[in-house]
Image (cartoon, grey):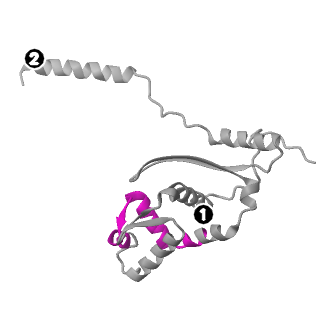
Amino acid sequence: MSEDKLTELERRIAHLESRVDTAAPRRPPKSPSLTTAATSMLRQAKEENRLGTVGYVGAARLAGGENLWDRQLSLAELLSADWAPVAAILESLGSRPRLALLAALVQQGRCTSTDLQESLGGDGEQTSGQLYHHLRALQSARLITQRRRGEYELAPQATVQVLTILAAAFDLANDPPLGPPADLLNPGGDQQSS
């Protein structure tokens, strides 16, 4: 490289470095506040004299594509539900191997039986008979589908709900107890005794 080219390159690098030093620091974009949404839901419940609403939102970039969701369900509808199908789904999720299978399907998308067997660990603890037992339970709950013989994927209609259930269960298992409900409309405000 000639001396002139080297000098020009050093000048350009110095110019770029000076621009970086004087540039304002970049901040990550602000996320919308879920507390704001919850506060709005509580206000609406008070105005309409209802029990309230439970909701869940999320965004994911998975093997099957991008997913955005925003779901709400009235507490009156939720609390008066037929619990039999709900219990069946929760029972199907109630084992570590099944959760490992769902995690593999979420992360990898479509998987073969061999892929799924490996996701359970190569220590031989889970035989192929046990694998198929877990797969049948997840299929019966309509959480996974079998595309072809020996090839499975998370059911498209279940992706959002499975991720939400897993996130809520993770929080239950790992968060400290919440204590009494927070006053979302008046955080840190004085509570009057009755």
Q: Quadrant of residue 34?
A: top right
Image height of 109 relative to 134, above or below: above
Q: Mark 1, mark 2: which one is toward the viewer?
A: 1
What stretch of residues is rendered in magenta? 90-118
Indicate the quadrant where residue 19 lies. top left
Q: Amino acid at mark 1?
A: Ala
Instruction: Where is residue 153? Give x, y as percent.
Output: 41, 63
Q: Secondary structure at mark 1?
A: helix
Q: Position of residue 152 (x, y in %)?
A: 39, 66
Q: Is residue 33 left or right of residue 154?
A: right
Q: Residues within 10 Å of mark 2 (few under 14, many from 20)?
A: few
The answer to whether residue 127 of the structure is visible from this angle is no
**Where is mark 2, residue-wise?**
4
Residue drawn at point x = 44 percent, y = 27 percent: 25
The disc placed on residue 173 is 1
Q: Give the mark nearer the N terminus: 1 vs 2.
A: 2
